Amino acid sequence: MEVIDVTNTTEALISLSEAANYLPRKGNGKKISVQSLERWIRDGSKGVFLEGARIGNTYYTTKEAIQRFNVRCMNAASQRQAVPTLQAPTPVVTAAAKLARRELAKVGWGSTPQAQTESRKPPVDPIHD
């Protein structure tokens, strides 16, 4: 939690209900809720915390803290890497896989689990068995 030092700040403290007025409205036209602002102070949002102070049961923040939070959120979002997507095998890869299966079959490595297990068994020793 990022705490604002209320005894040593040049920034004016504002209540979270005031702070909600400084933020753009959501896509549905509603303001950001005070509960969301409290959660951003307490728990953060994707690892980024809103600076705030709790005096009694009331949370406070500053306009400048909201701006810093916004900048840190934007930086964090731009640093996240996209999840790689799986792509279908290309015809060249598919052809290479077919060739490899044929070569393995030639040396006794079958395509079924039973054939694979049998091909890995050691040869029978008629003298000692």
Image (cartoon, rainbow, N blue to C red):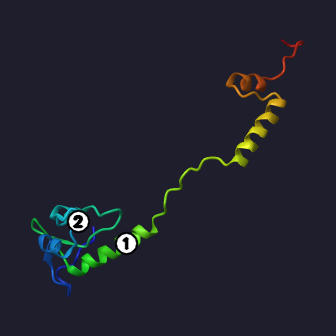
- Residue 128 spot, x, y in % from top left: 86, 13
Q: Amino acid at mark 1?
A: Met
Q: Residue at x 17, y 82 (%)?
A: 7
Taking the image as shown, residue 51 lies to the left or right of residue 123, namely: left
Image vertical order of residue 46 relative to residue 67, above or below: above
Query: The N terminus lies in which quarter of the figure?
Result: bottom left
Mark number, residue 21: none
From the viewer's side, name the closer residue of 81 and 55: 81
Residue 64 % position (x, y): 24, 81
Q: Amino acid at mark 2?
A: Lys
Mark 2 lies on a secondary structure that is loop
Looking at the rendered image, the quarter that the C terminus falls into is top right
Marked residue nearer the N-terminal end (2 or 1)? 2
Q: Which residue is mark 1?
A: 74
* Residue plotted at (15% across, 79% down): 13
Q: Nearer the viewer, residue 51 or 106?
A: 106
| Residue at numbered disc 2 | 26
Where residue 78 sits, quadrant-wise, is bottom left
Dot 1: what SS? helix
